[in-house]
Image (tube, grey):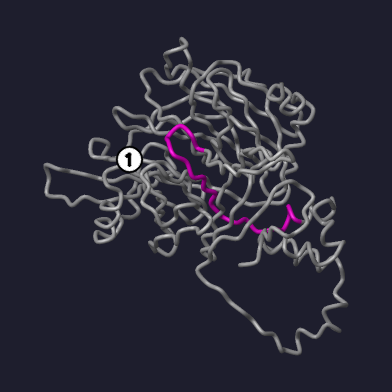
Amino acid sequence: MEGAFNNSMLLPFSYTFTPGTSSTSVTVSVTSPWMDTRIWSKLPQTLIDRVLAFLPPPAFFRARCVCKRWYGLLFSNNFLELYIQISPRRHWFLFFKHKSLKSYIYRNNNSTSDSGGKTMTANICEGYLFDPYDIAWYRISFSLVPSGFSPAAASGGLICWVSDEAGAKSIILCNPLIGSLSQLPPTLRPRLFPSIGLKVGPSSIDVAVAGDDLISPYAVKNLSTESFHIDAGGFYSLWGTTSSLPRLCSLESGQMVCVDDRFYCMNYNPFSVLAYEIAANSWCKIQAPMRRFLRSPRLVESMGKLILVAAVEKSKLNVPKSLRLWRLQPCGTTWIEIERMPQQLYLQFAELGGGHGFDCVGHGEFIAIIIRRSIKVLLFDILRKMWQWIPPCSCINGAGDDDDDDELHGFAYEPTVTTPVTGLLDQITIPIFQSFTN
């Protein structure tokens, strides 16, 4: 997959993919009679389409260079319907590099010269796709996303971008593989940096925006939640559904984790877990395990379960410091410990962390643990009980530097070449970006 997402490939959209580094490089020379072109050239097109639908995205976009018909598959309704039915789910990750907790965008400042010789600056936001199966990196451009937006959540192959400016929040849903952008109506209440929950299904979209209510130009308070819903059955709610947050809750601004029909986020001082029931439009509080001894607790979704990842420090007891994982039980109130990081690895992890803490993102059987103020990522495979450091991506500037200003912000990303559910937004949204082009 080294040659996937080649910049020289002619694509119908203004986005680019560039291969990163991979842990392996394989050259295969095929001499088997089973590859006889007289056999393979007679395969029916329907069978070829099924093979192409199983290809991972880098190989699919590379295959589109073979002929006009394959190039046009991205526009074929029959192929896209087949793709939705049989294409396997891929539990990838999408990372952004940023320099502060509140700015999740990494933008390259590429200087160009116009015809008059004046220097012009073009802001291009980049993301870094990571394939945990092949341990491969790919760089992807978000040049179509307007400035002033930051990625806040991901689901169903779509990235949710939220406006940075304080006030009513504008939200864009983007499929980076095909360059599609869909805008939601702005929220009704002014906020600063709210927590964002996104759930995208085959025929519905749910978005929740919670906390950081602006009660004055200089003060915020966690008071309310606004929710957006639309589905193929014709039902929609454009931020008309609101609910109050639990009293005295302390949310950390950022993304929420979706498991089944609930959004979860951490509550601080003291530690607990807040759960938002989408259908019931209500919040409840779940007590966290060992809450007095937790450090940097983070919630992730893994294989349909809610996982709590946290460091444990019992300074007054003869218990070694560790990093532990708990799974929320089906009853929804109790936790069971499922894993501990090996002690030798934890000592190395803690030394690299330097006391700055860590962030986590889970997808499928993988959990990526990101050390703050660095671009170092530790990957845990739940099924194989295996821990490994992810090789750095050569596309990330300063990959070998220890720059305390640089760190990664990650999302669980499922790459897909079609997201037809966004067509539901066409009949309700305003012309895209009309409020940003004055």
- Looking at the picture, tell me which residue is in the foreground, 176 or 123: 123
SS for dot 1: strand
Residue 61 painted magenta: no
**Residue 92 in the image: x percent, y percent?**
56, 54
Taking the spot 50% from the left edge, 37% from the top edge, the residue there is: 104
Question: Few, some or many C-alpha atoms within 10 Å of disc 1 (few <14, some 14-19, many ≥20)?
Answer: some
Callout 1, which amino acid?
Answer: Ser
**Residue 278 in the image: x percent, y percent?**
56, 29
Left or right of 69 in this view: 242: left
Left or right of 413 in this view: 252: left
Residue farthest to the front, as pictured: 116
Which residue is disc 1 drawn over?
A: 296
Residue farthest to the top, as pictured: 216
Residue 97 painted magenta: yes
Numbered circles on residues, count: 1
- Looking at the picture, tell me which residue is in the foreground, 103 or 55: 103
Taking the spot 58% from the left edge, 18% from the top edge, the residue there is: 168
Q: Point out the image quarter for the C terminus.
A: top right
The picture quadrant where one finds residue 295 is top left
**Residue 96 in the image: x percent, y percent?**
52, 45
Taking the spot 56% from the left edge, 60% from the top edge, the residue there is: 20
**Where 418 falls versus 241 (above or below)?**
below
Q: Point out the image quarter for the N terminus.
A: bottom right
**Where 225 falls versus 5 (above or below)?**
above
**Where 27 falls versus 421 (above or below)?**
below
Left or right of 272 in this view: 432: right
- Looking at the picture, tell me which residue is in the foreground, 291 or 399: 399
**Residue 149 in the image: x percent, y percent?**
58, 32
Magenta residues (range): 83-104
